[in-house]
Image: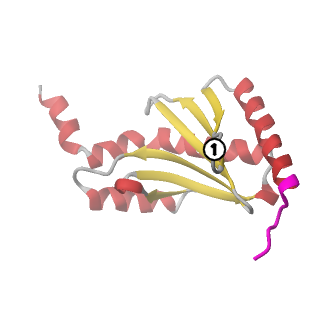
Amino acid sequence: MSDLFDDQELSRIEQQIDEWLAHLQAQNPAILAVDRSVEGDIRWYVRMQGEEKEFTTVWLTLGQRTLRYETYVMPAPEENAEALYESLLRRNEKLVGAHFSIGAEDAVFLRGEMPIGSLNEKELDRAIGTLYSTVEQYFKGFLQIGFARLFNSRFDN
């Protein structure tokens, strides 16, 4: 398979993403930090202040054909795994441009990707916003399912 974008074009896209992220950070006080990976893949992280989850960090990875975006949601459930995974799958049905998945050490992630040809500042903002708002909306409920005893013991005292 041939490369869709040459090195010069990928470099231009990389620079454009840097600019868009700086602009988004300047406009949005919830974005606490934007940084770049200096080795390996072309990656950025966008760290945001949350309300339900203290921080949400979205990783962006520029590939040859797509921009992948992902965030860590929570560790593997200690209990009620089947109920949690069912809940994740039901939420996937309603999500646009992202999906819940099980990653390293059975942790829960929220991921998506878009073709580089569709990438612009609005789509980048939409992708980051989708991950952020979805985590904010479901994080506490997922924890209550996957760590029910921990939540119940807090209310027993």
Q: At which x and y percent is residue 145?
A: 28, 48
Q: At which x and y percent is residue 156?
A: 12, 30
Classify residue 91 as left or right of residue 146. right
Q: Quadrant of the N terminus?
A: bottom right
Q: Quadrant of residue 16?
A: top right
Classify residue 102 as left or right of residue 66. left
Q: Residue at the front extreme? A: 39
Q: Is residue 60 visible?
A: yes
Q: Quadrant of residue 80?
A: bottom left
Q: Quadrant of the C terminus?
A: top left
**In terms of secondary structure, what is the magenta stretch mainly?**
loop
Q: At which x and y percent is residue 108?
A: 41, 52
The answer to if 10 sits in the magenta stretch is no
Question: What count of labels does the image hold?
Answer: 1
Image point 78% across, 52% down: which residue? 119
* Above or below, 55 relative to 135: above
Image point 29% across, 51% down: which residue? 77
Q: At which x and y percent is residue 51?
A: 47, 28
Image point 15% across, 34% down: which residue? 153
Magenta residues (range): 1-8
Q: Residue at the left extreme? A: 157
* Above or below, 5 relative to 19: below
Q: Secondary structure at mark 1?
A: loop
Classify residue 74 as left or right of residue 148. right
Mark 1 surroundings: few (<14), some (14-19) or many (≥20) residues within 10 A: few
Q: Is residue 96 visible?
A: no
Q: Nearer the viewer, residue 149 or 26?
A: 26
Q: Which residue is mark 1?
A: 39
Residue type of the residue flagged with mark 1 = Glu
